[in-house]
């Protein structure tokens, strides 16, 4: 593995590996086939604290550095991307609170998560995916409360989350400058979970729609300032993207591992197919892509921890790693041939799972918009 980790960091990653071997590997295919959310296994992971690695120690979390967290997420994704997404969905919702919340808000949110709760980041709507500025959910000030109305879709952890960060327009006429962010607890009257998505891949992760019907939240649940929500969302996604990239590397690495092991034992023309240059070069290119993506992610997270600009690097890391994961999964299916197309082997699941890595938390087309914009800014 291409991470330069000290002994303590290595032990954290090894613990995650051991957990995955025992609690995920034997069951991931069944979760995928049945579309089940593995609540009991998620609870076991939460008891260890895998859902709150980034929470600072002062708020009861582990306060682990970003690179180690990325290595842990890679490990989880190697075994099941859906499971990794469940954990990342909680940390995604936590990021804007840690960035822009008051000490009281940080403590409130962290207490829920550290206490065994899941979180969710509620930004996407049916007509506001890549165009988040088209948000129709509204939040109207009424006395000491805000009243939220609207719907969200494709929200990770919807059914099981205990607390949400919800983005709503407090001034529709201002577009993106009228979007604000709110902390919303699950037990608020008027809140409900609607349509559950029956997905092609990522089937162990819970994805559903949310409905807000006159949901009242106290004014002190406003995150930061009114009208700053879109900026907070973009900052959150910037920091989340390298972790999505890390999970993509997990999928890409699993594809290399499965294809490489198969190529050594499968014989054709009297020798292992790994000896055929066509197969060997596929494996080489898969490894090149995987390690390059991993190093880009490490670099991005080191910039973030050093408080240096990293928006361009985050977009590159997420985009490149997502493309590599999808390409590697396809090549693994090709190397395994007919067996690759069969559910008897895990690579067809990798292919179905990996497609989402080019879509969620900013499509790879959006990442290319970000990257090209940064490039062109150099020459203005």
Image (cartoon, grey):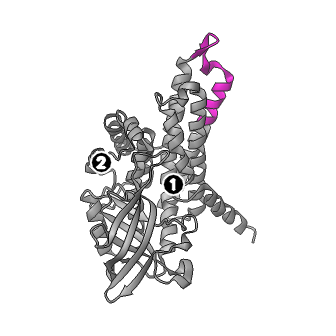
- Residue at 50%, 44% in the rendered image: 353
Q: Nearer the viewer, residue 222 or 6?
A: 222
In the drawing, does residue 372 fall left or right of residue 3?
right
Q: CA distance from mark 2 to mark 1?
A: 26 Å
> Farthest residue in the front direction?
195
User: Quick one: SS at disc 1?
Assistant: helix
Q: Establish if 156 lies above or below 151.
A: above
> Farthest residue in the bottom direction?
143
Q: Establish if 298 lies above or below 173.
A: above
User: For the residues carrying marks 2 and 1, which lies nearer the camera in this image?
Assistant: 2
Residue 39 is tagged as 2
Quadrant of the image containing the C terminus: bottom right
N-term mark: 2 or 1: 2
Residue 372 image offset from top left, x and y in percent: 69, 62
Question: Is residue 364 magenta-colored?
Answer: no
Q: Nearer the viewer, residue 277 or 164?
A: 164
Q: Can residue 90 be spotted in the picture?
A: yes
Residue tagged 1: 242
- Residue at 40%, 76% in the rendered image: 149
Residue 107 image offset from top left, x and y in percent: 28, 69
User: Over which residues does the magenta segment extend?
Assistant: 267-287
Q: Quadrant of residue 19?
A: top left
Q: Are marks 2 and 1 in contact (CB under 8 Å)?
A: no
Q: Quadrant of residue 109?
A: bottom left
Examine the residues drawn in magenta and state their main secondary structure. helix
Residue 185 image offset from top left, x and y in percent: 30, 69
User: Quick one: SS at disc 2?
Assistant: helix
In the drawing, does residue 193 fall left or right of residue 187?
right
Q: Nearer the viewer, residue 72 or 149?
A: 149
């Amino acid at each position: 593995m291409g991470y330069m980790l000290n002994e303590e960091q290595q032990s954290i990653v090894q613990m995650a590996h051991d957990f995955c071997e025992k609690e995920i590997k034997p069951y991931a295919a069944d979760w995928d086939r049945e579309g089940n959310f593995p609540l009991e296994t998620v609870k076991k992971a939460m008891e260890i604290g895998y859902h709150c690695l980034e929470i600072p120690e002062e708020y009861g979390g582990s306060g682990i550095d970003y690179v180690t967290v990325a290595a842990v997420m890679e490990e989880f994704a190697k075994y099941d991307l859906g499971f990794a997404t469940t954990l990342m969905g909680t940390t995604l919702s936590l990021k804007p609170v840690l960035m822009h919340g008051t000490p009281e808000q940080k403590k409130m949110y962290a207490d829920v998560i550290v206490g065994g709760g899941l979180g969710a980041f509620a930004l996407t709507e049916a007509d506001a995916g890549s165009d988040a500025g088209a948000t129709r959910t509204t939040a109207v000030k009424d006395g000491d409360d805000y009243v939220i109305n609207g719907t969200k879709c494709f929200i990770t952890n919807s059914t099981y989350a205990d607390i949400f960060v919800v983005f709503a327009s407090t001034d529709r006429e201002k577009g993106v400058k009228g979007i604000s962010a709110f902390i919303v607890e699950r037990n608020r009257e008027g809140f409900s979970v609607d349509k559950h998505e029956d997905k092609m891949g990522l089937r162990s992760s819970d994805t559903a729609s949310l409905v807000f019907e006159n949901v009242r939240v106290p004014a002190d649940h406003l995150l930061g300032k009114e009208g700053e929500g879109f900026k907070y969302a973009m900052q959150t996604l910037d920091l989340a993207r390298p972790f999505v990239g890390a999970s993509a590397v997990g999928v890409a690495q699993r594809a290399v591992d499965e294809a490489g092991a198969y190529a050594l034992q499968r014989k054709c023309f009297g020798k292992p197919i790994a000896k055929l240059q066509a197969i060997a070069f596929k494996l080489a290119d898969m490894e090149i892509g995987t390690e390059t993506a991993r190093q880009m992610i490490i670099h991005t997270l080191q910039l973030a921890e050093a408080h240096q600009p990293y928006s361009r690097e985050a977009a590159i890391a997420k985009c490149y790693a997502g493309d590599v994961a999808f390409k590697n999964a396809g090549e693994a299916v090709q190397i395994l041939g007919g067996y690759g197309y069969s559910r008897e082997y895990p690579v067809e699941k990798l292919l179905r799972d990996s497609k989402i890595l080019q879509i969620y938390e900013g499509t790879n087309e959006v990442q290319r918009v970000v990257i090209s914009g940064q490039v062109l800014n150099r020459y203005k």
